[in-house]
Image: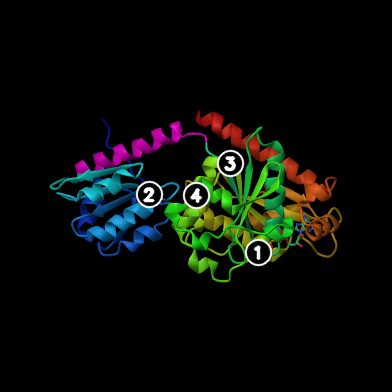
Amino acid sequence: MSAPDFTDRHVLVVGQRLAPVAQEGLGRARFEVAAADRLDVLGAAHAAVELVLIDAEAADANQLLGALSALALRPQPPAVMMAGAHLPASLVRALMKLPRSDVLEPPFTSVDLAQAAAALFAGVEARAAAAPVNARCWTVMGSVGGCGATTIAIELATALGARATQGRRVALVDLNLVDGATAAYLGAAGAMTLAEASAERIDGAMLDAFSVRIGERLDLLAAPRDPRAFARVTPTAVCRLLEVAAQVYEWIVIDLPRHRQAWTLDVLAGSDEILVVSELTVPALLAARSLAAEIEAELPEGPDPRIILNRLASRMFGPAPTLSEAEKALQRKADGGVTSDWEAAAASVNLGGSISHHRPRSKIVRDIGVLVDRLTQSGEAVRQRRA
Ligand SMILES: Nc1ncnc2c1ncn2[C@@H]1O[C@H](COP(=O)(O)OP(=O)(O)O)[C@@H](O)[C@H]1O
Ligand SMILES: [Mg+2]
């Protein structure tokens, strides 16, 4: 049997004593090492971390318990391996709530550790293949303010609602928790008081209370204005909300703020598609290129971000870049384009509702339809390849 290969696996080691044996056993993995009293690193751990090794004997049992329970609430928690003898039952129970975990009893060698880690990674692949059908999640982010991310998220959600399976619904989730615009654009009032909810209590009933019915098959989850919301809402609450929503809805479209929050990478890691919206100005294109590159660097396993160019004019006024100039600035191809139609966009937000409702013949609606067809077809192809 060949030795397991851990090249580029992202491993977080909590407890410096463990680091040498982990580095010997897991060879070319990418390591982060934190002291055993820094369990807070677990809460802040990057969504890209695949395995956490914890020296349970060096850590405080109560803090460890809290940290494990918080990890269990994440939509895709990393595998966790705990090293220690005579662990308290409460800790072992918390460990068992994680989808993939193991205990290593000292004394153990680097080979024992490598074997246990390989078994956990093999479990991930098996789980991914057998994963139940969850909502498909598309996340929309603007490269700069005002480039049309919210407008595109609304139109995508509306178009997906029209395509949803009989009896299933689509959720538009606005994570601009401070001053999101989706509710105002749709002429609704946001009811998602996420800052007041403790993560453990978020369930289907609470999701129902948070959601506002927009159309026959579309619900809006948007927060009422709250200047302190980003400071008040915890990453576990955001992750739990999306996890519950994934069990309820057929599609989830997220309007994601472009400024990084503690939960941004978790949301992106859980998305099937990441759409970076840009307008055709040089600063927006350069920002889109940087944002896409950042996402790719931080989530190498995640979906490749796609660039959507918004407000394309059929006739250019002034020195706007052409599509080929735009792609040169982006250093990549654009994956979709949406035509400019100020009248339709302005009329719809003023009346309250989607453009497809108020101006169904707008080119914006046509272009969004093309984009949805393309993305659903490529998503279907990916799923069939995996099956
Ligand atoms: N394709 C488009 N054509 C014309 N106006 C648009 C288009 N997309 C968005 N807009 C308008 O641009 C403004 C900013 O859009 P918005 O979706 O709020 O951007 P963001 O969420 O990126 O800040 C709004 O007035 C919106 O109606
Ligand atoms: Mg917006």
Q: Amino acid at mark 4?
A: Ala
Task: Categorize mark 2 by other alpha carbons within 10 Å: few (<14), some (14-19), many (20+).
Answer: some
Q: Nearer the viewer, mark 2 or mark 1?
A: 2
Which badge, 2 or 4, comes first in the chain's sequence?
2
Task: Categorize mark 4 by other alpha carbons within 10 Å: few (<14), some (14-19), many (20+).
Answer: many
Q: Amino acid at mark 2?
A: Ala
263 vs 143, left or right, is: left
Q: Which mark is drawn over residue 218? A: none
Q: Which mark is drawn over residue 72? A: 2
Element carrying mark 1: loop
Q: CA distance from mark 2 to mark 3?
A: 22 Å
x%, y% of residue 237?
47, 56
Q: Which residues are magenta?
A: 111-133
Pointer 1 residue Cβ closer than 8 Å to ligand 1: yes
Q: Which mark is drawn over residue 269? A: 4
Let me know if residue 187 is in the magenta part. no
379 vs 63, left or right, is: right
Which badge, 1 or 4, comes first in the chain's sequence?
1
In the rendered view, tell whether residue 296 sits above or below residue 258: above
Tag 2 and tag 3, C-beta contact below 8 Å: no
Which badge, 2 or 3, comes first in the chain's sequence?
2
Residue sticking out furthest to the bottom: 227
x%, y% of residue 257?
59, 61
Q: Residue at x 30, y 59 (%)?
A: 33
Q: Which residue is mark 1?
A: 144
Tag 2 and tag 4, C-beta contact below 8 Å: no
Q: Nearer the viewer, mark 1 or mark 3?
A: 3
Q: CA distance from mark 2 to mark 4?
A: 16 Å
Q: CA distance from mark 3 to mark 4?
A: 18 Å
Q: CA distance from mark 1 to mark 3?
A: 29 Å
In the rendered view, tell whether residue 108 sits above or below residue 174: above
Q: Which residue is mark 3?
A: 249
